[in-house]
Image (cartoon, rainbow, N blue to C red):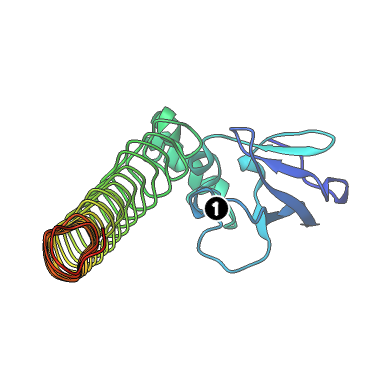
Amino acid sequence: MSPEFTDDDIGKSVINADGEEVGLVADVEHGTAHVEPDPGITDTIKAKLGWGDSDENMYPLQEPAVAEVTDDEVHLERDLESSSGADTGAAGAGTTAGAEAATGSTDTADRGGDTFQDDDDEFIDDDDDDLIGDDDDDGLIGDDDDDDLVGDDDDDLIGDDDDDLIGDDDDDLIGDDDDDLIGDDDDDDLVGDDDDDLIGDDDDDDLVGDDDDDLIGDDDDDLVGDDDDDLVGDDDDDLIGDDDDDLVGDDDDDLIGDDDDDDLIGDDDDDRVGDTR
């Protein structure tokens, strides 16, 4: 059994069996150390220390829970529940713990790699497990990579990269790049997207207001008001008001009122009376 705590132990770091600092000895009363928990420790760790069900700022640490006291640290036993009882801070916990250890009713040491500090187990803050807040290859919210829930990368729900729902890149719904719905860039088929086939998109589609398509108001199409098509008001077509076509009022055609190279009256360089040259 460890010696009673004294005022000389105040200020020492409290270290669990895995080498993690879980608190600081803030006071000693009647041989019992009172520990102020580290703000960063998880509720799981606090529960194992018997500190989880209280709102106190400090928690009593019974002697049976202590493995070793050095000049600047207090080291805890690994099997806290069997060494100090179900509640480490409870008075008389050591006696209760002895009975539990004798019957084998509580033995967390048997869990080995399944504690919260290790990789590949089933607790929070571990890699490659199945619970919230863990990295890689699990199936719950808030985990990175390769799972199926919200807030994860490379899964199939909202807010994740490379999935199929709204707000993700490289999926098939609204607000995503490289999909087929409204408001997405590149390579889809709806309004407001580049390189698609509907109204209001740039380049390579077939509707009004788009470049390089075949409808009104577009360049390089076949309707009125477009360049290089075949209707009125366009350049390089065959209707009235266009350059280089064959109708009245156009240059370089064969009708009245056109300049050059036609065969009617009123045009230059033609073959009729009243024309120059």
Residue 53 rendering spot, x and y as whole percentages: 50, 64
Asked which secondary structure carries label 1, the reply is helix
Q: Quarter of the image containing the N terminus?
A: top right
Question: Horizontally, is 13 left or right of 106 in the view?
Answer: right
User: Residue farthest to the right?
Assistant: 8
**In which image quadrant can residue 162 be found?**
top left
Question: Horizontally, is 24 left or right of 264 in the view?
Answer: right
**How many labels were placed on the picture?**
1
Q: Quarter of the image containing the C terminus?
A: bottom left
Q: Amino acid at mark 1?
A: Lys
- Which of 209/266 is in front? 266
- Which of 168/263 is in front? 263
- Which of 174/129 is in front? 174
Asked if 148 appears above or below 90 in the picture, the reply is: above
- Identify residue for label 1: 46
* Residue 124 appearing in the image: yes
Question: Residue visible at 27% across and 48% down?
Answer: 178
Residue 252 rendering spot, x and y as whole percentages: 21, 57
Question: Residue visible at 40% across and 29% down?
Answer: 110
* Residue 239 appearing in the image: no
Q: Residues within 10 Å of mark 1 (few under 14, many from 20)?
A: some
Residue 171 rendering spot, x and y as whole percentages: 24, 49
Residue 92 rendering spot, x and y as whole percentages: 58, 53
